[in-house]
Image: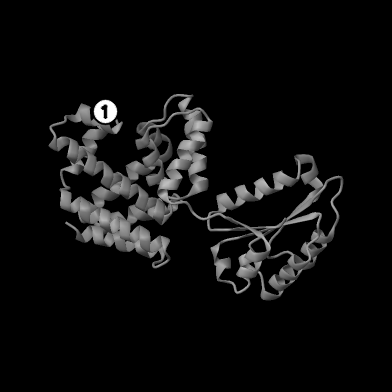
Amino acid sequence: MNYLIIGDDAYLREREENKIKEKFLSSGEADINFSIYREEDDLSDIMDSLGTLPFLADRRVILVKEVENFTESSLNTLMSYLEHPTETSVLIISADSNFKKNKHYKKFVSSMETIAADVPQAHTMKKWIKSFLEKENVDISPQAVDLIVELKGQDTAGIKAEIDKLISFSGGNKIEVKDVEQIVGRSVTETVFKLVDAIDSGDGEWAFRILNDLYNDKKQPVEIIGYLGWHMRMMQGVNLLSSKGAGVNEIASKLGYSPGYVKRLSYQAKKYDHSKIARRVSLLFETDKAIKTGQKDPNIALQMLVVEFLKDK
């Protein structure tokens, strides 16, 4: 059996690669019967590995990554191999979605078992977080799950890393919004407060200086949009509860934050009516969509978003 793992989620591709390897090889067998190759490796080495018999094992597993960058000649050679594959070798081809544009893609699909590794949608990511934590016997509030996805976007590897930290931090207790803000958001939410203050004051120079600070902290455009989305949700929540007569302590209890933190949110929320929040949420959604569908360069799209926010008094 040979496998094609295709999709843009690097974490999911690697997880599927490991699952296949572990299906055919024990850890001891993998030391001498598992090989990894990439586009810079000599194709003759790949073909030699595919033709080599396994040693003290039933199978030899060969993982070929970054196939989307292979030359047509190399792909033809791999395609020819798949017409008469070695019975004792398992070939895993791993590629991002660019490989789907290759004219040979359908031939590979027809010759291999195809496994999707697409970037999950938000609702799928939330289900995955809940399922993962259930297996670890750790409870989490729905609001905390929402905040993780809002802050980290669809970065599966990043979310997995943050979940591991939250599990250690929780000590077995239920994970709440305040825990996510402290562990996942930490200093970034403070930076977002400053970014929103700069935008609301109409200070473009200050706003773009803060944006550069976020870039320097290795934050990606989609992730920053997630933080801004979280902030809009907080503004909406504070205003809604305030309109119902809720005080600071009640709002803090509902949102899962300290009263001091809610006071800061309430101060900013006074500058946002329903229509302003709706406009900004719409801009956030359109920008996120334009980035994820490849319509706009992520950095340019985010800069354009900030400009639109600055114009929206």
Q: Amino acid at mark 1?
A: Ser
Closest to the observer, 218 or 154: 154
Is 74 on the left or on the right of 311, as rendered?
right
Front position in the image: 273 or 210: 273
Label 1 secondary element: helix
Is any part of residue 42 visible from this angle?
no
Q: Residue at 84% across / 51% down in the picture? A: 54
Colour basis = one colour
Q: Is residue 310 visible?
A: yes
Please name the residue shown 68% across and 48% down the image: 20
* Vertical arrangement, residue 276 with respect to residue 77, above or below: above
Assign the C terminus to one quadrant of the image: bottom left
* Residue at the image position 21 percent from the left and 34 percent from the top: 263
Q: Point out the image quarter for the N terminus.
A: bottom right
User: Total label count?
Assistant: 1
Tell me residue 281's x, y (percent): 26, 53
At horizontal 41% and vertical 66% (from top left) the residue drawn is: 297
Q: Is residue 283 above or below residue 32?
A: below
